[in-house]
Image (cartoon, helix red, strand yellow):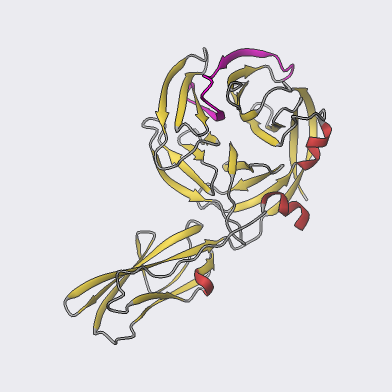
């Protein structure tokens, strides 16, 4: 089991921070019962105020992720680094102290393998970044400066039906299709493009907000979800394309960064980590990694050549109720069924 988990769960990191510095004069600080300020979902968190100068504290109000909580409560929140704030009243004054706590999942991810149903030809020169079915058609985004493309592909034959080359300064990344519009990300230029799904004509562009880079993107028929190469997956309003809230991808052990290509499948986000031949199955509400799929055997089934790179590209076809995966400069597209070990 540990072998398969390592495909996704390499270099997990825990984060904890102490109280801020604004209360140094008073000596007041916020304490938690969590060891190293790390706690799991479902556990009880106890809060208290450290008051070394015995100031006459009248009232304390605690907030966790902007919601008021009692001094003892059961943690049921998004995972990752979260803020706890205490507003303290004393001597007709009010001071605010805070700390950060890392929330982990309360169970290890399930481990899955796969069964190959079909193999189809795929352009061996394509540095695949994004892959998605829409109305029975397969759309693909490829990367590398000077080689980046947006394509409509006949997945059974590998024939490119339509092709749009990106300008040389852009490095293509993930794509998704919603309401007859293709949203394609680029890497370090802070820019995404919008296309008409039928003609592939460019209809507009958008800038990223709080995140630095564009990696992967998917949608749940209403909201866009965007990765930026960290552990964060942002939500975007498809009308304004403004980044709103985000989830942080965590397991029961720690943070999972380098979240890359995304696909929405039956209420979950499937995501691969950059440079890993596996996929994480993520709860889109709280960021919990609920499962991992080891796809490393697939790389051995494609033509081996000097430019062969890692798995990248996962697409769900609702017409067949199956999943399709490929990789960077792979000459095969695999139709697979995921099987729990």
Residue 269 seen in the figure: no
Q: Position of residue 3 (x, y in %)?
A: 77, 54
Residue 85 seen in the figure: yes
| Residue at (60, 12) in percent of width and height | 162
- Is 221 contained in the magenta span? no
Left or right: residue 156 versus residue 170 is right
Q: Which residues are magenta?
A: 156-181
On screen, residue 43 above or below 139: below
Left or right: residue 144 versus residue 111 is left
The tally of labels here is: 0
Q: Position of residue 123 (x, y in %)?
A: 72, 20
Closer to the camera, 76 or 309? 309
Left or right: residue 196 versus residue 144 is left
In the rendered image, which quarter is residue 152 located in?
Answer: top right
| Residue at (55, 51) in percent of width and height | 249
| Residue at (69, 54) in percent of width and height | 110
Q: Residue furthest bottom?
A: 54
Q: Position of residue 80 (x, y in %)?
A: 51, 57
On screen, residue 190 above or below 154: below
- Is 178 contained in the magenta span? yes
Q: Position of residue 268 (x, y in %)?
A: 58, 43
In the rendered image, which quarter is residue 222 located in?
Answer: top left
Left or right: residue 41 versus residue 108 is left
């Amino acid at each position: 089991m540990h072998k398969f988990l390592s495909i996704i769960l390499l270099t997990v990191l825990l984060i904890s921070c102490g109280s801020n510095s604004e209360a140094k004069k008073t000596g007041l600080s916020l304490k938690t019962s969590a060891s190293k300020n790390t706690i799991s979902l479902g556990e009880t968190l106890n809060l208290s105020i450290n008051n070394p100068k015995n100031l006459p504290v009248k009232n304390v109000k605690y907030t966790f992720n902007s919601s008021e909580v009692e001094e003892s409560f059961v943690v049921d929140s998004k995972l990752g680094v979260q803020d706890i704030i205490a507003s303290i009243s004393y001597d007709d004054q009010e001071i605010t102290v805070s700390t950060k706590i890392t929330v982990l999942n309360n169970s290890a991810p399930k481990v899955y393998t796969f069964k190959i149903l079909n193999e189809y030809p795929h352009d061996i020169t394509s540095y695949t970044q994004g892959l998605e079915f829409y109305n029975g058609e397969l759309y693909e985004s490829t990367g590398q400066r000077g080689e980046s493309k947006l394509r409509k592909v006949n997945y059974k034959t590998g024939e490119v039906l339509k092709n749009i080359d990106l300008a040389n300064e852009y490095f293509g990344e993930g794509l998704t299709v919603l309401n007859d519009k293709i949203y394609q990300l680029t890497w370090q230029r802070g820019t995404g493009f919008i296309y008409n799904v039928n003609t592939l004509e460019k209809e507009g562009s958008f800038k990223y907000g709080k995140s630095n880079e564009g990696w992967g993107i998917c949608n749940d028929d209403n909201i866009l979800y965007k990765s930026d190469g960290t552990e964060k997956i942002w939500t975007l309003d498809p009308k304004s394309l403004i980044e709103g809230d985000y989830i942080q991808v965590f397991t029961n052990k720690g943070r999972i960064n380098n979240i890359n290509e995304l696909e929405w499948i039956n209420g979950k986000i499937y995501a691969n980590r950059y440079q890993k031949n596996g996929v994480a199955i993520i709860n889109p509400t709280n960021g919990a990694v609920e499962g991992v799929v080891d796809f490393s055997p697939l790389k051995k089934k494609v033509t081996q050549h000097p430019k062969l790179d890692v798995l990248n590209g996962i697409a769900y076809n609702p017409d067949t109720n199956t999943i399709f995966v490929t990789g960077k400069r792979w000459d095969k597209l695999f139709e697979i069924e995921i099987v729990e070990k």
